[in-house]
């Protein structure tokens, strides 16, 4: 049988008629395949919702359509961007919207009258639960969101600093050791190592997973070093195209190129003169530049591009990477000689799961920071929520913790946050929540990665153990030194010696 019977109604013959038919068909199509639709008038007031949309109402806090229709769209749909569509007349064909009802893939289309004036807009929920239907897209979105949040924070703190120290704010470090929250043994130990590194002028290599606070510690080391009054200049090697890295590092001599660079340009080594140069993501450095960096570090001189002249520099080097540099060396992708040049003072920043007892303090500090920026009350985590946080593996470490908190706050009507809300946020970020756990540090042997803490001089480890044993015993005896010495089986003189000179 032919698909179109001869007696089927034909297409209208006039263009207007065809357009109207197309518009009507499209509207019907969207209405049936989408998860829900609503209309707002020119003033942004909800005038209609279809049946599909009604099932989102309870999650948005409404028990009937009557409560919803007639209100302005911002009042009833948190984080909506419909107002922008009304103001600009531009459609948003695809977007992600997150609010307390969940995350949705949405479309927003302006409606125009015959004179082409915007008279309203239609909002369409194309998918709900995009975390299951659109997993790859959502993961990418989460990653981009993370970078955007980091960039926003960075911008905000740069603005704050440049307001505080007008004109001179940009090249100062923004964190001190006090910004590194945590008093667990692992946190205390990394701070001790970093403080010691601050006293020295040798290169420091900060190693640790993503989001553990390497950059924060680099700032803190600079701020506690004798170069604190000099500039802190950082270069993210992974973010600069390989072809531009050399000029970024060493600068360009005047006349080396035609065009914009004709006047020459200072490199980061020059900008950091008298201060600290932080080479972030050093594991991503291309081989050709590794050779040049090594030469510069050995000679204490750099050669700006096109200059044929060696210029001495006075810069202290800090480097960081979340990659396994030793493996890169073994695979021949990172020069061994450069590795040893940088590996003079390695500081291993522990993952969050190795310092779970710090989670409540981190939650408090991160929550206060969020509240300050959003002008809201700091979040309060209910006990089940805190236990859930303690049980997670936190592959993205403190950055991930911050993002989870931020999302939870955004979705919540009240400051108190429970485990169910956090579970939803984790799932939407593509993480299957692990079981809750008591807020306790995992035993070092539970976690293979923790064994890296033993890869340092034995004398250092023994000294650390002694310090901890003495502190714990002193505490247990209310500061009584005689009882402490007795319990530890050492003489009082030895105890006094250790207390006076803990290193
Ligand atoms: N101990 C801490 N106390 C408070 N905030 C922290 C702590 N550690 C990290 N943060 C915060 O977590 C975020 C990530 O830290 P940072 O950028 O220093 O990580 P990183 O180790 O450099 O990560 P990556 O390898 O991904 O660059 C930042 O917002 C930082 O301020
Ligand atoms: Mg970093």
Image (cartoon, helix red, strand yellow):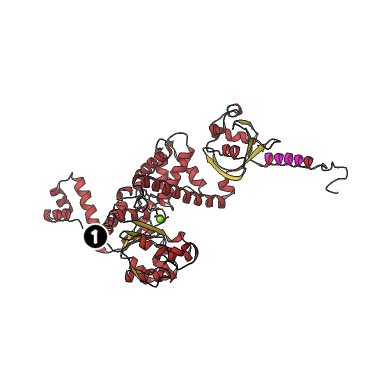
- Category of crowding for the residue at label 1, using alpha-carbon neighbours closer than 10 angstroms: few (below 14), some (14–19), many (at least 20): few
Position of the C terminus by quadrant: bottom left
Judge: label 1 CB < 8 Å from ligand 1. no
Q: Position of residue 492 (x, y in %)?
A: 12, 53
Decide if residue 333 is in sight here. Answer: no
Q: Is residue 360 left or right of residue 38?
A: left
Q: Main secondary structure of the magenta part?
A: helix
Q: Does 201 appear in magenta?
A: no
Q: Which residues are magenta?
A: 19-31
Q: Position of residue 462 (x, y in %)?
A: 24, 60
Decide if residue 283 is in sight here. Answer: yes
Q: Position of residue 201 (x, y in %)?
A: 27, 62
Considering depth in this image, is 166 or 479 the residue closer to the camera? 166
Q: Position of residue 18 (x, y in %)?
A: 78, 42
List the residue tagged with mark 1. 462
Name the secondary structure under disc 1. helix
Q: Is residue 8 above or below residue 250?
A: above
Q: Is residue 425 left or right of residue 119?
A: left
């Amino acid at each position: 049988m032919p698909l179109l019977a001869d007696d089927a109604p034909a297409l209208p013959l006039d263009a207007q008629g065809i357009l109207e038919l197309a518009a009507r068909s499209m509207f019907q199509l969207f209405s049936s395949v989408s998860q829900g639709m609503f209309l707002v008038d020119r003033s942004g007031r909800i005038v209609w919702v279809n049946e599909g949309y009604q099932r989102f109402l309870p999650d948005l806090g409404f028990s009937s359509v009557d409560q919803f229709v007639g209100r302005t769209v911002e009042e009833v749909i948190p984080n909506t961007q419909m107002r922008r569509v009304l103001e600009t007349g531009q459609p948003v064909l695809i977007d992600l919207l997150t609010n307390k009802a969940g995350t949705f893939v949405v479309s927003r289309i302006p409606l125009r009258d015959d004179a082409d004036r915007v008279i309203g807009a239609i909002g369409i929920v194309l998918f709900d639960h995009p975390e299951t239907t659109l997993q790859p897209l959502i993961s990418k979105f989460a990653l981009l969101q993370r970078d955007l949040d980091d960039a926003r924070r960075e911008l905000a703190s740069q603005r704050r600093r440049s307001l505080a120290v007008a004109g001179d704010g940009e090249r100062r470090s923004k964190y001190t050791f006090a910004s590194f929250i945590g008093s667990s043994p692992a946190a205390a130990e990394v701070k001790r190592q970093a403080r010691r590194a601050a006293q020295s002028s040798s290169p420091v290599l900060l190693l640790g997973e993503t989001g553990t606070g390497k950059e924060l510690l680099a700032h803190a080391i600079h701020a506690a070093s004798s170069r604190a009054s000099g500039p802190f200049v950082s270069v993210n090697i992974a973010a600069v195209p390989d072809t531009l890295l050399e000029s970024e590092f060493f600068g360009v001599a005047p006349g080396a190129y035609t065009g914009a660079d004709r006047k020459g340009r200072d490199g980061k080594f020059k900008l950091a003169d008298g201060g600290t140069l932080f080479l972030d993501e050093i594991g991503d450095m291309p081989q050709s530049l590794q050779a040049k960096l090594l030469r510069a570090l050995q000679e204490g001189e750099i050669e700006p591009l096109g200059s044929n002249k060696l210029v001495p520099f006075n810069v202290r080097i800090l480097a960081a990477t979340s990659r396994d540099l030793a493996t890169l060396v073994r695979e021949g992708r990172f020069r061994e000689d450069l590795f040893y040049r940088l590996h003079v003072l390695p500081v291993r920043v522990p993952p969050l799961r190795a310092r779970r007892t710090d989670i409540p303090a981190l939650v408090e500090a991160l929550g206060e920071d969020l509240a300050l920026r959003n002008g809201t009350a700091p979040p309060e985590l209910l006990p089940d929520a805190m236990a859930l946080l303690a049980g997670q593996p936190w592959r993205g470490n403190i950055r991930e913790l911050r993002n989870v908190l931020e999302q939870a706050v955004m979705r919540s009507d009240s400051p108190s946050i429970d485990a169910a809300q956090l579970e939803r946020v984790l799932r939407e970020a593509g993480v299957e929540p692990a079981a809750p756990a008591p807020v306790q540090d995992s035993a070092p042997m539970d976690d293979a990665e923790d064994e890296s803490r033993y890869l340092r001089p034995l004398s250092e480890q023994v000294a650390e153990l002694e310090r901890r044993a003495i502190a714990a015993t002193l505490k247990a005896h209310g500061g009584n030194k005689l009882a402490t010495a007795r319990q530890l089986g050492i003489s009082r003189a030895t105890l006094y010696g250790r207390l006076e000179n803990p290193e």
